[in-house]
Image (cartoon, grey):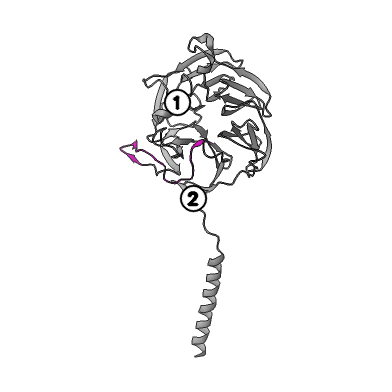
Amino acid sequence: MQRRKFIRNSFLAVSSVTLTKNLFKKPQEKSYGYNGMLYTLDTAWSKCSSAQYPVNDCHEMVQDSKGRILLLTNETHNNILIYDTDGKLIDSWGHDFPGAHGLTLHDENGTEFLYITDIERHQVYKTTLDGKVLLTISAPLDAGIYKEAKEFVPTETTIDNNGGIFIADGYGAQYILHYDKTGKLLNYFGGRGDGPEHLDNAHGICWDTRSTDPAHSTHRAGHSLLITDRTRNCFKHFTKEGKLIDIIDLPGACVCRPVIHKDHLYAAVLRSPDLKAEGTGFVTILDKHNKVVSNIGGSEPQYQDNKLQPMHQTDKIFVHPHDVCVDRDENLYVAQWASGKVYPYKLKRV
């Protein structure tokens, strides 16, 4: 009897401890994504007061060499908000960019500069990190491709090693315009049209710096431009002279600008399957062979006969994601357009 009583009491004691531990165990956070590219979601990352530091559309974000996250918004109370990676506001500036849209960071001989596109002022600006304007580029009316300045509606820029500036006129005539570092027009290509070399909603542009395997790629790392063709659900590789190299089809994904980090390509998908479908955004991630490996808030990537099947939103965690910033720890920050003036969300890599 004594032995049975001892066993029963021991069982009850262990059960009580186990139950207590389970009651106070922190629930596991839900993760989003596939194939090892998994993230947890923090919708309250920004510690800003909306009354003091309002945002309108949160368009794009970059991380500087100090590890700070810079956000561009078309709210002229504060066009630029500067955060640490925990979401604490460090600084803010800017009242002159009502159409602030594209934000590019470029290191020029050890000094970082910003390139801002404004779709309402129809101009591109090179600035210091604290907002001093150093160069302004307006519509190149002398080139004969624009009749008036308002036809030039630049959405994004990328800069080459010589300081040359490539501008994507993504809401205008759809040209890619190449300028030297002083703002002199050198060349242009693309433009609106139905051919594969033409563009429709050339929303973003960057240099593709990913390392490549010659057996899987026709371009060399850092020697080709990666340009958005958002209406047609794809990215296109071009030489810097404007020759089409290849097309990365992304069925169901109206992608924004391409963002390169190490061997991966990240992009916000504004809407799916087309631009008429409101509130259907997600984030997509491609490997160095341009194969989709993960979608955040979107369907699992599926390939049949080496062809990507149409993708779509599965989790309503984003409304209209507009850009992805990847930090040094491979966490993501997602800025959104027309989404209730929400601050950026942080996605922590699992």
At numbered mark 1, what does the secondary structure look like: helix, strand or loop?
loop
- Report x, y in % for residue 287: 45, 37
The residue that label 1 is drawn on is: 201
Q: Amino acid at mark 1?
A: Asn
Q: Is residue 316 magenta?
A: yes
Q: How many marks?
A: 2
Identify the main secondary structure in magenta: loop
**CA neighbours of label 2 inside 10 A, class few (<14), some (14 to 19), many (20+):** some
User: Which numbered mark, 2 or 1, is in the foreground of this view?
Assistant: 1
Q: Nearer the viewer, residue 43 or 110?
A: 43
At numbered mark 2, what does the secondary structure look like: helix, strand or loop?
strand
Bounds of the magenta segment: 302-323
- Report x, y in % for residue 61: 58, 34
The residue that label 2 is drawn on is: 31
Q: Nearer the viewer, residue 6 or 130?
A: 130
Spatial CA span between label 2 and label 1: 32 Å
- Report x, y in % for residue 201: 45, 25
State yes or no: discs 2 and 1 in contact (Cβ < 8 Å). no
Q: Earlier in the sequence, mark 2 or mark 1?
A: 2
Q: Is residue 122 magenta?
A: no
Q: Does residue 276 sit above or below 300 in this rendering?
A: above
Residue 247 image label: none
Is residue 163 visible in the rendered structure shown here? yes
Residue at 67% in and 34% down: 92
Q: Does residue 282 sit above or below 10 in this rendering?
A: above
Q: Amino acid at mark 2?
A: Ser
Quarter assignment of residue 21: bottom right
Q: Nearer the viewer, residue 118 or 263?
A: 118
In the picture, measured across the screen, residue 214 lies left or right of residue 43, that is: left
Is residue 330 visible in the rendered structure shown here? no
